[in-house]
Amino acid sequence: MSERPVECSHCKKVTKICYTQIINDVETSLDMCVDCPILQQRMTGIKVSDKTQPNENEMGLCCGNCGTTLESILTGTPLGCSQCYSIFEEVLINDLLSIEAIPSRLEKRLNRKKSQPLHVGKSPSISINIPASSRISTLNEALNEALKKENYEQAAWLRDQIKDIMDNPDGTKKTST
Amino acid sequence: MEQKKLLPNPFYTHPAWDENSNPLWPATAFYLHRNFVGAPFPSKMKNSQAVKLSEQITACMLKLQQLQNPIKFKADDLSPIEKDFLYEHFICKEPCQNALKGQSFIVDDTAHFLALINFSDHIQMELVDCKNKWEKAWEILSDIDSAISENFEPCYSSRFGYLTSDHTKCGTGLIVNCYLHLPMLIEGKLLEEACKNHLEESVYVTSLHGKVDEFVGDFVLLENKYTLGLTEEMILRDLHISATKLTLAEQTLREKCKKEHFIQTKDAISRSFGLLKHSYQLQIKEVLDALSKIKLGIDLGWIEGIHDNKINQVFFTCQRAHIGFVFPNIGVDPNEITTKRAEYIHSEMKDVIFKE
């Protein structure tokens, strides 16, 4: 099942590790991601600077406009301004890829062309209207499937749904309560 | 102390979802996140910047024709219980109880629209659709967005789309939640398989509390996994396909249950009926789980004397802040709340009959 993954307590990435610490008989457990810099810090006592993480110079990277640091982004702090997107572009894309927040077909294109625009939806100059027909075609597909399986109860329910959308495509009809 | 009712009247007279009588798919919530050029994102804003921007945005939104008598509340205009009320009413994703100076709320007479100003983003709009009219809901939200964009230039790049403070929401900035009531699939432990078979790749499953091991009230939430790389139409289409297929799977089970009179289902409904009718203290989770079974019982024809949309209403009204407005002099003692909740449930259940 495609479930929303449990997020790291610090980085908002998918958790892979349960970190348990016992101090003075008090046991606390935290779900953490593999790359969590806080986890690395707790395990080794030093800050992360291995090859999988940005190097020390990069770790000092900071947005000149709002002061957001790379380190804070890696620990899940929200971005501070629109310029953070250009300053931390590569880190953000790597993060989106690692948490699978980009569709797989786009991921392949991204590997081929690094400057590929990732956004394909509405823009400030172009608004997108969604016709009711797109929902009707979905329901029609399901209706055909139900008829193929000779499931006439499902088919009747789907037909009602289609009729409802066709009779009242703009949704202005009042529903009786 | 008696609570003042500051929100528009429909919030108190028509709780969320009460316009819907679809037993399987009571509501869909659309969330849109936007930031504007000229100010850092809220986490980096100075107090004075936040106050100024909040005033400018709210002034613009109060003139919008897409909203019905919009009204704004600064963070400190609303009492904690009123903020809790909004949180419950809109099943907010963002905790709004601890709103600070420079943050504000906009609601309107439909009681289906909420804008959070300067929370995680400059503006986060939520529109709840209970009539299964997605295109209309999207059109309203998109029109509001366009109207605001005429006055405030949105933070946008061709590579990342609309720029949000949480980069996992950039792109369309659109999150959609379909609320599905699937007790038969959950009780029969068939949800996992149904999701495997019917869910599109771009769709997540989650629950009212964000957990996937416990579906309170037997509500399953479908949410889009991507905001980047898909158009708004694709996002809605994938969710619609997934939700339609899951509701069909649930409905097939219900039809089978009606014909074969599943004894476990009947027993669960009967127990829930007894719990709601005869308890003197009720915790919220047990109420939501029991109401789910009553909702199912209505659809199966085993429960009479109450309508499905009434159950939707009770589902919201039994929550902590809502109860505070049903019993205006209620205190904060948890025991008193559970007692009053049971009292409220008794009154709503008084005409309900379980058919043997």
Image (tube, rainbow, N blue to C red):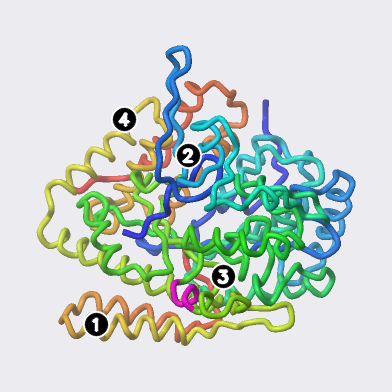
| Chain where mark 4 sits | B
Res. A145 mark:
1
Magenta span dominant secondary structure: helix
Q: Share a chain, discs 3 and 1?
A: no
Q: Nearer the viewer, mark 3 or mark 2?
A: 3
- For the point 78% across and 53% down, the residue is B72
Choose between A134 and B312: the one closer to the eye.
A134
Contact (CB < 8 A) between labels 1 and 4?
no
Q: Is residue B28 visible?
A: yes
Res. B228 mark:
3
Res. B278 mark:
4
Which structural element holds mark 3? loop
The quadrant holding residue B136 is bottom right
| Residue type for callout 3 | Leu
Contact (CB < 8 A) between labels 3 and 1?
no
Which structural element holds mark 2? loop
Choose between B218 and B69: the one closer to the eye.
B218
| Chain where mark 3 sits | B
- For the point 57% across and 60% down, the residue is B168
> Real-space Cα distance between discs 2 and 4?
16 Å
Q: Share a chain, discs 2 and 4?
A: yes
| Residue type for callout 4 | His
Q: Nearer the viewer, mark 1 or mark 4?
A: 1
